[in-house]
Amino acid sequence: MSTQPEKKSRFSRKPKDPDNPGRLSQFKTLYQASVKQNPKIPLWMALTFVVTLLVFMVLLHFIWSSWIYTAILGAIFGLLATVIVFGRLAERAAYGSLEGQAGGTGAALQSLKRGWVYEQEPVAAEAGRARKMSELSNAAMVFRAIGKPGVVLIGEGPSGASRKLLESERKRVARVAGPEVPVHVLRVGAGEDTVKLGNLAKTMKGLDKKLTDAEVQAVTKRLRALGASKPPIPKGVDPRNAPRMDRKAMRGR
């Protein structure tokens, strides 16, 4: 009986890694999650493709008299436009799924680009009377991001508790960062004096830039040395488990 190992074909497929799904698998997962949040996404995608196809066919027909060439190019541009529109709609759907969820701010901060240093965990939290995961929506949290505009503190949760926690954290940060470092305070939500979760990154990017890259790094070191001020959160409650957005998949990559 032969004991030699079985030879593998050079063209045999490698087994799939469940921890590293392919691009198509990621796109499929993102599409299903987005459609679940917004069922009109397939309609908008189809409409985008058809309109783009027709427009480019008409415009390109003045250059090439052949409808075959114009149809092919129109289909290519239609697919490109459809992917772009899907990315926008998927991003809105992702933010919509995070609205009202505890720790949603930490997930939304991932859309910030280079130049920002942020904490995915809250730097301050007050769970109040919450005793289990289902009651965490009543918890107030403060997240922190540092960039050229200065230090940005973002509060989420009940209005009264989050305002109180934000003010306490603002004073704490101001003492360590110094008077030359601006400290901005924002609250996410749907009421007055709040910023929608989907507009959070845009609002932060619109703040006036006051610090250099070196100053941002220096302030980051100071605040990380300060540590976090987090009263106990109920056992089993972990804001880090908030859903994360796949930025590459939303761009269609």
Image: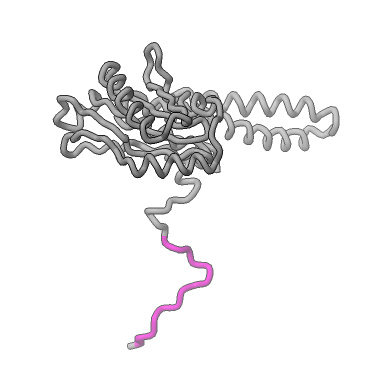
In front of the other: 66 or 201:
201
Seen in the image, is 230 located left or right of residue 213? left
Colour theme: one colour
Residue 13 lies in the magenta-colored region: yes
Residue 242 lies in the magenta-colored region: no
In the image, residue 75 sits, relative to residue 12, either above or below, namely: above
Furthest-bottom residue in this view? 1
Where residue 2 sits in the image (x, y, percent)? 36, 87
Q: Tell me what residue is drawn at x 37 percent, y 54 percent.
A: 18
| Image quadrant in which you'd find residue 127 | top left
Look at the image and give the residue range highlighted in magenta: 2-15
Q: Main secondary structure of the magenta part?
A: loop
Q: Tell me what residue is drawn at x 32 percent, y 40 percent.
A: 226
| Image quadrant in which you'd find residue 104 | top left
Where residue 193 sits in the image (x, y, percent)? 40, 14
Q: Tell me what residue is drawn at x 44 percent, y 37 percent.
A: 110
Q: Tell me what residue is drawn at x 75 percent, y 28 percent.
A: 57
* Image quarter (top left, top right, bottom left or bottom right) of the N terminus: bottom left
Q: Is residue 30 visible?
A: no
Seen in the image, is 194 located left or right of residue 164? right
Furthest-top residue in this view? 192
Q: Is residue 210 visible?
A: yes
Where residue 151 sits in the image (x, y, percent)? 44, 31
